[in-house]
Image (cartoon, rainbow, N blue to C red):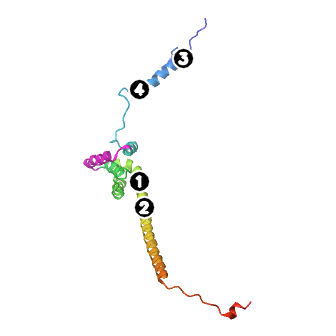
Amino acid sequence: MKNNRRDGCFGMDRSPNALLFSFCLILAGCAVNPFGPRKPTYDEPGPLPPLAYYQMLSRLTPSELSRERMVLAALPANPNTQLRTAMLLGAPRAPQDLGRALGLLDHVLKSSDPAALSLQPLARLLADNYAERQRLDGQLDRQGQQLKDSQRKAVELQEKIDGLADIELTLPARPRSQRPASQRSAP
């Protein structure tokens, strides 16, 4: 008689479909978290939680950002808190203090604390970004001042031109000079 069974793993007899079904069940069991989906916490070291925090800051309103500033001020000073405070100080919809943010990032970059070491690449990126923003803000201020100066000079020049035009209007009209006859008939 012919044996319809196939030898499977570990010498057990199974059909290919049953083996595939078992494998899928094992994989599905590994994928299920009995405690529900894991929410990221913002106190963990490493690059992902600070990036998630940075993303969260972009969604906050100005009043929520000021509340967050008070919360961070109450926390103990550590590299993680310094990095988050720097992120908050550079947030576009909050009162910005890029100089102070750069100072905090500099502390993180110079720290030898193990928690700071994992944050240093992100701190370097933020420091470079904030320094560039400061440079561009300074350049924009200088260009604004140059524009005001050139507008002021243009107004002064226009006033001088208007003054000269007024003087010209008050001058008596010059009589037309007659050409001598010798110049008229010389063809």
74 in magenta: yes
Q: Which of marks 4 and 1 is nearer the N terminus?
A: 4
The residue segment tinted magenta is 59-77
Name the dominant secondary structure of the magenta segment. helix
In the rendering, at what x and y percent does residue 86 appear? 35, 52
Q: Of label 2 and label 1, which has the lower sequence position?
A: 1
Dot 2: element: helix
Badge 4 is on which residue?
32
Q: Dot 1 corresponds to which residue?
A: 124
Indicate the position of residue 134 as horizontal and vertical percent values: 40, 59
Q: In which quarter of the image is the N terminus?
A: top right
> For residue 105, which quarter of the picture?
bottom left
Residue 104 appears in the figure: yes
**Name of the residue lying farthest toward the top:** 1
Query: In 3D space, how far apart are the residues under numbered discs 2 and 1 (Cα atoms)?
Result: 16 Å
Crowding at dot 2, Cα within 10 Å, few <14 / some 14-19 / many 20+, comes out as few
Q: Alpha carbon of mark 4 to alpha carbon of mark 2: how far?
A: 50 Å
**Percent from the top left, x then y, of residue 49?**
37, 42
- Looking at the image, do the residues carrying marks 4 and 1 touch, with CB atoms under 8 Å apart? no
Q: Is mark 4 on a helix, strand or loop?
A: loop
Identify the disc placed on residue 17: 3
Dot 1: what SS?
Answer: helix
Vertical arrangement, residue 117 with respect to residue 17, above or below: below
For the residues marked 1 and 3, what is the alpha-carbon distance in whole angstroms? 54 Å
Reading the image, the residue beneath label 2 is 135
